[in-house]
């Protein structure tokens, strides 16, 4: 085998692992990798304006494709800027690879310029963080990084590359190399049999579909099992889209924030829950003794340590969600089982039809649920949405419909402000080859909009069009609500209003070469969405629809799922 630059071998490994685009910012300590990317070709690259933005772009790309997204930064603050993105991916089980440059190996103990121990910093928020110390190890470390990111519970990996290691040559032949195999986590058949027996013995069972259903691409098997046995299905926030919310067996979302009234009611009447790839996050469960109740739980998860982490289930099953669903479907067919809608299914449908929340508000200032009514009616089922953290995430969980998997991307556990703009870039670029005309829509708040607003320049430079719908109350709305109703009785340092509307977000868009419009009355929403669609198509750049809502709006919330407070009149 001939000797080649080690970074050329790395680029060839990246391409063979399915990487066709990377997001990053070149710097002196990572230039050998960039040189190899330039010479080898085959990997597109977007220059970000902040390294955190690169990680969220890779995150959005991964959530859409199911593959490992790649973000690149140089040494020192580039790596530390990427920690939030690693944490976000780690919290939501998203496989991304972050590559950082590093000072020369001989200088690391001398506090060299921009030398920081990024491996130790990143360890708590990655599945694996490693520094390449020997050039000959680099291709194998990258292979292992992809295997680690994809296997078991997916997640992020960081590889740190000292500049002297990057400059070396190694013996490498890409023609005889391939990705490392990933073990399939199959369920133990006796446990599958027990799970089916428990399902059949229950009078009021529910299937709870978590993010693991989407990560495993198990949505078809989920619906097949639900229909075969006639078991209603709920979704967690991360599982939103795994079943069409108009499906007759969809039973809503349970939670103390992102939930439906009928979802909580259905859950409280259930006597068994089959949880698939769900973490039992605290905003889903609320007070545990109420959530747990007397009902039985079967918990299926690919990660053994997730089972029993929040509470002990009646049955735990370690398995890939798709393989478990295939196994239980096969077993049900072996037994000749078929179901028909019974009293429990009819009860869930009754709850779904009656325990709703109002959306048809004509008030000025605009009430947020009206916006989601317009969104649901205007956009088709093939639209891709991204949204992050704030009151609008809660409103979205309560009101927005999500008919398809991987079309509703939400950062769940970490909740970083500013996620939507770079994530939308990642989603749109992920669709460039397969669905170039797909609509991508980011739903943002007025505060989080400005956290990574500079990434609009990336979208403008590379002609990445998407629509941003801003729900603007000129408040840190979620914190204001927590201060006001959480026992503090205050509104301290959460009001960001000044002048007439605060920051002129339309002008901010225009400063980046993009466009936008402001909406103040409900009947203006639909025309603005129509304009934004045409404008994004015309300019191939982001377009903003800023919607001014009532300043002190509240979402339904509580601390226990049987006592969620409604702030708007219910039908």
Image (cartoon, rainbow, N blue to C red):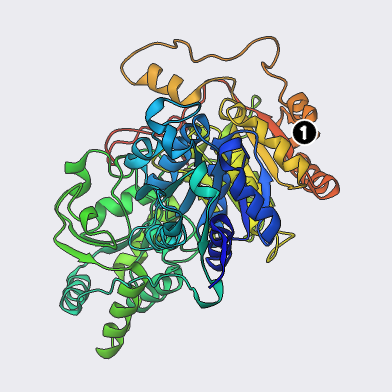
Q: Is residue 4 above or below residue 439?
A: below
Front residue of 20 and 194? 20
Q: Is residue 222 above or below residue 100?
A: below
Tell me residue 529's x, y (percent).
Answer: 74, 43
Q: Locate residue 315 relative to residue 551 in the image: left or right.
A: left
Front residue of 528 and 249? 528
Which of the 4 image quarters holds residue 473? top right
Tell me residue 90's x, y (percent).
Answer: 39, 46
Q: Is residue 487 above or below residue 408?
A: above
Disc 1 packing (10 Å; few <14; some 14–19; many ≥20): many
Q: Secondary structure at mark 1?
A: strand
Which of the 4 image quarters holds residue 512? top right
Which of the 4 image quarters holds residue 30? top right
On the question of residue 341 being in view, the answer is no
Tell me residue 292's x, y (percent).
Answer: 18, 49
Most extreme residue toward the right, as rendered?
A: 538
Q: Locate residue 260 relative to residue 334 in the image: left or right.
A: right
Q: Is residue 396 above or below residue 364?
A: below
Tell me residue 286's x, y (percent).
Answer: 27, 39
Q: Locate residue 1 relative to residue 527 in the image: left or right.
A: left
- Number of numbered callouts drawn: 1
On the question of residue 123 being in view, the answer is yes
Residue positioned 35% across, 65% down in the render: 232
Q: Locate residue 180 relative to residue 324 in the image: left or right.
A: right
Front residue of 315 and 38? 38
Residue positioned 37% across, 70% down in the render: 182
Front residue of 548 and 516? 516
Residue positioned 17% across, 49% down in the render: 311
Residue position marked by numbered label 1 in the rendering: 516
């Amino acid at each position: 085998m001939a000797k080649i630059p080690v970074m050329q071998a790395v680029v060839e490994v990246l391409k063979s692992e399915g990487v066709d685009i990377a997001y990053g910012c070149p710097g002196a300590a990572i230039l050998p990798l960039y040189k190899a990317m330039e010479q080898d070709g085959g990997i597109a690259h977007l220059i970000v304006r902040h390294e955190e933005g690169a990680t969220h772009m890779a995150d959005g790309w991964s959530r859409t494709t199911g593959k490992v997204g790649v973000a690149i930064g140089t040494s020192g603050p580039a790596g530390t800027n990427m920690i939030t993105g690693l944490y976000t991916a780690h919290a939501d089980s998203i496989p991304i690879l972050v590559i950082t440059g590093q000072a020369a190996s001989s200088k690391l103990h001398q506090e060299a310029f921009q030398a920081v121990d990024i491996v130790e910093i990143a360890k708590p928020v990655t599945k694996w963080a490693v520094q390449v110390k020997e050039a000959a190890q680099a291709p194998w470390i990258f292979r292992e990084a992809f295997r680690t990111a994809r296997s078991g519970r997916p997640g992020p990996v960081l590889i740190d590359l000292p500049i002297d290691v990057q400059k070396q040559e190694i013996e490498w032949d890409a023609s005889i190399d391939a990705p490392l195999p990933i073990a399939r986590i199959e369920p133990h058949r006796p446990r599958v049999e027990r799970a089916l027996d428990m399902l059949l013995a229950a009078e009021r069972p529910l299937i709870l579909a978590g993010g693991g259903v989407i990560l495993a691409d198990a949505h078809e098997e989920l619906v097949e099992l639900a229909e075969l046995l006639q078991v209603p299905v709920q979704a967690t926030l991360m599982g939103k889209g795994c079943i069409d919310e108009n499906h007759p067996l969809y039973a809503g979302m349970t939670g103390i924030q992102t939930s439906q009234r009928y979802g909580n009611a259905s859950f409280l009447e259930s006597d068994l829950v089959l949880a698939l790839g769900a973490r039992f996050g605290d905003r889903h469960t609320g007070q545990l003794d109420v959530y747990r109740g007397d009902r039985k739980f079967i918990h299926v998860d690919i990660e053994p340590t997730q089972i029993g982490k929040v509470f002990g289930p009646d049955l735990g099953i370690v398995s890939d969600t798709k393989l478990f669903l295939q196994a239980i479907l096969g077993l049900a067919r072996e037994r000749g089982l078929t179901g028909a809608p019974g009293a429990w299914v009819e009860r869930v449908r009754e709850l779904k039809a009656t325990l709703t929340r109002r959306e048809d508000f004509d008030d000025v200032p605009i009430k947020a649920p009206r916006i989601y009514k317009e969104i649901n009616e205007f956009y088709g089922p093939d639209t891709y949405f991204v949204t992050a953290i704030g009151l609008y995430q809660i409103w979205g969980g309560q009101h927005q419909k999500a008919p398809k998997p991987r079309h509703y991307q939400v950062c769940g556990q970490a909740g970083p402000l500013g996620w939507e703009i770079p994530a939308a870039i990642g989603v749109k670029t992920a669709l460039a080859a397969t669905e170039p005309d797909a609509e991508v829509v980011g739903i943002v708040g007025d505060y989080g909009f400005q956290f990574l607003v500079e990434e609009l320049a990336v979208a403008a430079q590379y002609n990445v069009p998407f629509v941003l719908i801003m729900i603007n109350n000129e408040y840190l709305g979620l914190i204001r609500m927590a201060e006001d109703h959480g026992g503090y009785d205050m509104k301290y340092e959460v009001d960001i209003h000044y002048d007439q509307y605060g920051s002129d977000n339309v002008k901010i868009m225009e400063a980046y070469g993009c466009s936008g419009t402001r909406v103040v009355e409900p009947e203006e929403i639909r025309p603005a969405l129509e304009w934004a669609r045409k404008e994004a198509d015309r300019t191939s750049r982001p377009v903003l629809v800023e919607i001014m809502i009532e300043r002190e709006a509240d979402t339904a919330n509580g601390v226990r799922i049987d006592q969620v407070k409604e702030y708007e009149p219910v039908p």
